[in-house]
Image (cartoon, grey):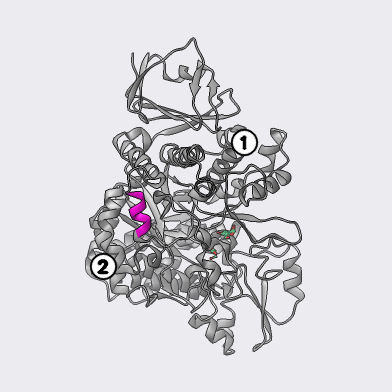
Amino acid sequence: MNPASESKRCLTRILHAIDLSSLSKTDHKLLLSRLDQHFPALFDLLLQVYDKHYELHYHLQQLVQTLASQFAQRNARLKKKDKQRLADPLWHKSEQMLGMACYVDLIAGDLNGVREKIPYFTELGLTYLHLMPLYKSPEGDSDGGYAVSDYRCVNPALGTTKDLQVLAQALNEAGISLVLDFVFNHTADDHAWAKAARAGDEEYQDYYLMFDDRQLPDQYDATLREIFPSVRRGSFSYLPDIQKWVWTTFNNFQWDLNYSNPAVFRAIVDEMLFLANLGCDSLRLDALAFIWKDLGTVCENRPKAHALIKAFNCCLQIVAPAVVFKSEAIVHPDEVVKYIAPNECQLSYNPLLMALLWNSLATQKTRLITQSLSHRFAINPQCTWVNYVRCHDDIGWTFDDGDAAHLGINGYNHRLFLNQFYTGRFENSFAVGLGFQENPENGDCRVCGSLASLAGLQQALERNSPPLIELAIKRMLLLNSVILSIGGIPLLYAGDELAMLNDYSFQTDPHKLHDARWVNRPRIDAQAIALAHQPGSPQYRVNVGLRKMIATRKKYPVFGAASTQVLRTGSDHCFAYLRQTDNGERLLVLCNFSDSERELSADILHHLLPAREVTDLIEHQSVVLDFSNPLLLTAYQVLWLYLPIAVN
Ligand code: GLC
Ligand code: GLC
C-alpha cells in the first residue's frame, strides 16, 4: 500500500475509535479538515522516528485524541487569531517588528507588573516580548527557570495561570506578540514524571534516559560535547537512591527526556498545546539541537531531532496555527540553518551574526563577517531571522573554521584571542566581561557580560574618560544599527536599551554564584531607567540613539520584507549590505567597525545608481553621491543610504 493511503486508513481508524463529542459542529469540521491536511505529514514523520515501535498505532491514536482535546480547549479569540495568521503567514517579516527578551521578576516583579509596563513597551515600539521561563521550577538554582517542574503551573512568585492569560491578551491588544519558552529537551528533577521515575515507576523511568551502570554512559561520553563542564565532567548524573545514571546535558537537576519513547512525544505535545492555548504567538524551542541521541555521534542536530520538531510543528498546525516556532540552535552555522523551514521553525536566533558582530568590534576588521554572511545569511523567504546583540546567555564563537581558514585565520587560536579580549585578559581591550564554563581539557570557554560593559562603557566610566565614553556609545549604536537593518526581527535584551552595566550581585547569591551568565541579567530598577532619561548621560545618549533608529525602521518597508545582499567593500574595516524590496526600494548600509576614520571606495555607491542623491536615514539628511572620490566614514560611523524607488 502506498504511504498516502496508509496514513488515510490509519486516520480513519483512529477517528472511529476516539471520542470527539466535546467538539462543536464547526470545530469538528475544522479539526477534520486540518487533520486531512497535516496528518499525512505527521504520520510519515513519526514513522521515520518510530518505525520499529510495536505500539506505534496505539500512540498515534493517543496523539490524535490529545490534539482533539486541546483543540476543544482553544478559546474563540485564539481560534480567530489562527484564522488571521493563516491569512497573513509572513506577519513576522514586517518592518514594524521589534522584540525584547526579559525575566519577569527582573523587569517588573511579577506578571501583573509586566502588564503595567505595557505603555513602556509600546512607547519603545515593541511588537514581540519574550518572557523567560515563568513556569514552576525548583527552589534555589533552577537555571533561570530552564528546569521546569510543571509546565501547567506558573511560578507562584510571578503570578497565576490566569494572570498569564490576562497578560497575553493585554499584550495582543497592544499589538505585542507573546513568546514563551518550550523547554522540551529536559524537565526538572522534581517534575511529577521525574518523581515517579525516582520512586521506581518503570513507565516513567522510560521517560528519561536512565542506565544501571557506566557502560553506555561511557560510550556516549566518548563522543559528546560537554555543555556545562564546570558543573560536572561528562553528560550523566548519578542518582544514589535508585543507583542509576541519568542523562543530563545541562545541570544535574535537568534530566533529558527520552524521545525514543513515543509516549514522551505525546505527553510533550500535550504540554506544548497547553502553552499555545494560553495565548502565546511563538514558542521558543529551547536547546532543540539535543533532543535526539545516536550512539557514536555528538548527539546534536540528529536527523530524527529534525523529524520530531517537524512533527511537533504539524501538531501546532492542526491545533494552534497562529503560533510559530523559534529555533534556539546555538551550534555550527551549517546546522543552525537546517532548523529553519516553514514546516520546522519559522523563526530562528541568528547566533552567527551575533558572534561576528563582537568579533568585528574586537578585531576592528570585517573580513570574517563579510566572508561568512555573504553565503550564510539567506534563508527560506517564508522564514525570519531573530537578530540579537546580547541575550540572557553567554557568547559562543560559533563561526565556521572553514570561513576563517579561507582568510588565513586559525579558528581555534582566534577563539582563544576573543575569549581573552572579552574577559579582560588582553591588554588594550575595552571590554569588561567574565569567562563561562571553562573546559579544563581544551581550555575552551564562552563569554558573559552586558552589551554596555562588553562594548567599553564600564571601563570608560571607571577611567572617567570622555573620549572612551564616546567610543563606547558609538559601538553600542553600531551593533544595534545592524540588527535593526540587516533583515529579520531585531531582539533587544532588557536593560541593553538603557545601556546597563554588568551586575555582579549574583556573586553573593549561593544559588547563582557559579553561573556567570547572571552578570548580564541585571534587575531593571528605577535608577537605571532614570539614568537613561537624564539628558547628557551616556545611557541617555544610547537610549535616544536607539529610539531614533527604531522609529526610522518602522517608517520604511525596506527594513522589513526585503532581500539582503552582503557586499564586499574593499576595506578591511567596513561592513556593507544592500537591502531591496520587490518594488525597488533600496537601502545601502555602510558601517565602519574601527575606532578611526576609514576610506571606502566609491564603487560601492553604484548599487544606488542611477540616483545622484539619496537620504541618509541615520542623520536624516540628503547625500549627493560622489563617484569620483573615496567615501569617508568616521570612527564607528553608520550610513543608511536610502533610495525610495527605482529611478528611471
Ligand atoms: C538554553 C537556554 C539556557 C539554558 C539551556 C538549558 O540554551 O537559553 O539559558 O541554560 O537552554 O535549558
Ligand atoms: C550551549 C547550547 C545552547 C545554550 C548554551 C547555554 O551553547 O548549545 O543551547 O544556550 O549552551 O550556555
The disc, 1 or 2, on the residue closer to the chain's N-terminal end is: 2
Q: Can residue 109 be seen in this view?
A: yes
**How would you rate the neighbour count of disc 2 (Cα within 10 Å): few for under 14, some for 14-19, many for 20 or more?**
some
Mark 2 C-beta to ligand 1 under 8 Å:
no
Q: Give the range drawn in magenta.
A: 527-533
* Residue 619 at x, y percent in the picture: 35, 29
* Residue 166 tag number: 2
Identify whether 462 is placed above or below 191: above
Based on the picture, tell me whether residue 436 belongs to the magenta stretch. Answer: no
Residue 88 is left or right of residue 182, and the answer is left
As drawn, 176 above or below 559? below
Task: Say which quarter of the image contains residue 110.
Answer: bottom left
The dominant secondary structure in magenta is helix
The spot of residue 285 in percent (x, y) is 48, 60
- At label 2, which amino acid type do we have? Val
Q: Does the magenta stretch include residue 532?
A: yes
Q: Which of 636 and 306 is in front in this view?
A: 636
Q: 216 or 142: nearer the eye?
A: 142
Q: Name the residue under label 1.
A: 368
Query: Residue 523: image x %, image y %?
Result: 42, 62
Q: What element carries label 2?
A: helix
Q: In which quarter of the image is residue 172?
A: bottom left
Task: Find the residue positioned furthest to the top.
Answer: 628
Tell me residue 445's x, y (percent).
Answer: 66, 56
